[in-house]
Image: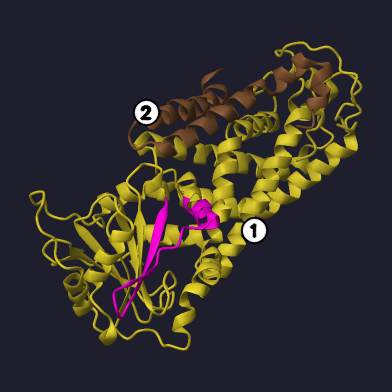
Chain colours: A yellow, B brown
Amino acid sequence: MTSSAIKGWAWVHKWSSLVCTVFMLLLCLTGLPLIFHHEIGHLLGTEVDAPPMPAGTPRASLDKVLEVARAQHPDRVVQFASPPEDNDDIWFVTMTPTPAPTDDFRSVAVDARTAQVLAQPRFDEGFMYVMFKLHVDLFAGLPGKLFLGLMGLLLLVAIVSGVVLYSPFMRKLEFGTVRRDKRPRLKWLDLHNLLGIVTLVWALVVGATGMINTWADLVIKYWQYDQLTAILAPYQGEQTVPLAERGSVQRSLEAARAQAPDTRVSFIAFPGTAFSSPHHTTFFFKGNEPFTSRLLQPVLVDAKTTQVTAAPHLPWYLTALLVSQPLHFGDYGGMPMQIIWALLDIATIIVLGSGLYLWLRKGKTEGQHKPHAAAAGVAGSTPQPASPSPQPAMGRSGATTDGAPAARWEGTP
Amino acid sequence: MSHHGHGHSHPHAFRALWGWPIALGLLTAIGLISALFSDGGLGDIVAWVTLGAVTATGLWFGWARR
């Protein structure tokens, strides 16, 4: 690599990192508790548990469940209903002022067997909600999401340029060298390089899937346009089906389930909401296998007649979105994986923090380092033949010895 | 990688520089993917071992080894 190429990559690395670092630190810090949101929810008592009943206890009609939920909030409409991830004994019914997307929602947990209200957990307040909102959209809705997505893109640029720079920095150093006996700057440079390269693929995957998740709202809108336009053509000009004209949701569920055997309900979207159409109750089913449980099969049921209108195959872009989610959340491999996720998250915080430190300390130490310090820095590493290729040294320190490029490079980010 | 060309003339240098990063990257990829196809089974254990090894590598070189 020529020295001008290195300069160019260093410029890209510096600016892409500088712009996104503060936001990435925020995302890493708020993401840390989110990794354990189930466990924290249990500790805080916000998780809802259904009383155990013998297997095969008959289930209440979904219509009854919804009626009970509506009675709790007569001024609201039902947007969604869903069972917990691995338990069919509870229905969470999400209630909002109108079917439009909003942050103003109430949740009613109804026992799926007795149709009794179990709890009304507030998912829109408290510590975890603040962490969640800061992590997802900075309390700024879709623009906030897309902004964080852009920061995620800059992170990916920073990671790729960092990998390119790893080579000139590390060529003369053994893997994992941390020069802690020298000035702190060298130690943090080495830790930055070490932890950056160790977390590389994980950070790329979590960064990229996080960025993809910020597009979720837009992807779903596109899906409605792409797949539902044709299906909805016969309904053109009709209003959102009023509650009084809707058929039985329980019957709709049975009709929909016949289209997707061997599946479980992931969630139900009611007419007029973001995941349905104005004329349909849309049932999203998930598979029973580890991998298919992440994929969804939508079935649109006419809200008036309770007849199935369509069961469109999930397009590739929604499949990609759904598969990208566990890869971002780290919630798909049990507690050991959550702990690993947290440790890698902390390592990323150190990479971000040390990067910031190296940039902040840059001006103060410039010109202080001497070539002999550089030579001493590699004393412990494997001796290597002098490379005939252009050295990345910028010559700022005037070094002419075959010292460590990293040490000679100290003045740059 | 940009140094691949360089690596042809110095295969040892290439391996010395990129051997560890490539191994760690492969381990991470295997771990991330294997758990996707498992629910409490072998794939999860593969993920714990591979991702755990990657994490341990960072801890070892960063702090444990003095």
Q: Residues within 10 Å of mark 2 (few under 14, many from 20)?
A: few
Marking on residue B42: 2
Q: Is A9 on the left or on the right of A350, as rendered? A: right
- Residue in view at x 73 percent, y 25 percent: A170
* Residue that carries the numbered disc 1 in the rendered image: A150
For badge 2, the amino acid type reads Leu
- Viewer can see residue A176: no
| Helix, strand or loop for disc 1 | helix
Instruction: Choose top left, top right, bottom left or bottom right for residue A246.
Output: bottom left
Count the labels in the image: 2
Q: Is A340 on the left or on the right of A93, as rendered? A: right
Asked whether A184 or A11 is in front, the reply is A11
**For residue A314: magenta?**
yes
- Residue in view at x 14 percent, y 65 percent: A60
Asked whether A269 or A397 is in front, the reply is A269
Residue A292 lies, in percent from the top left, at: 39, 46
Instruction: Choose top left, top right, bottom left or bottom right for residue A257.
Output: bottom left
Tell which tag, 2 or 1, sits nearer the viewer: 2
Boundaries of the magenta span: A295-322
For badge 1, the amino acid type reads Leu
Look at the image and tell me in which quarter the N terminus of chain A lies.
top right
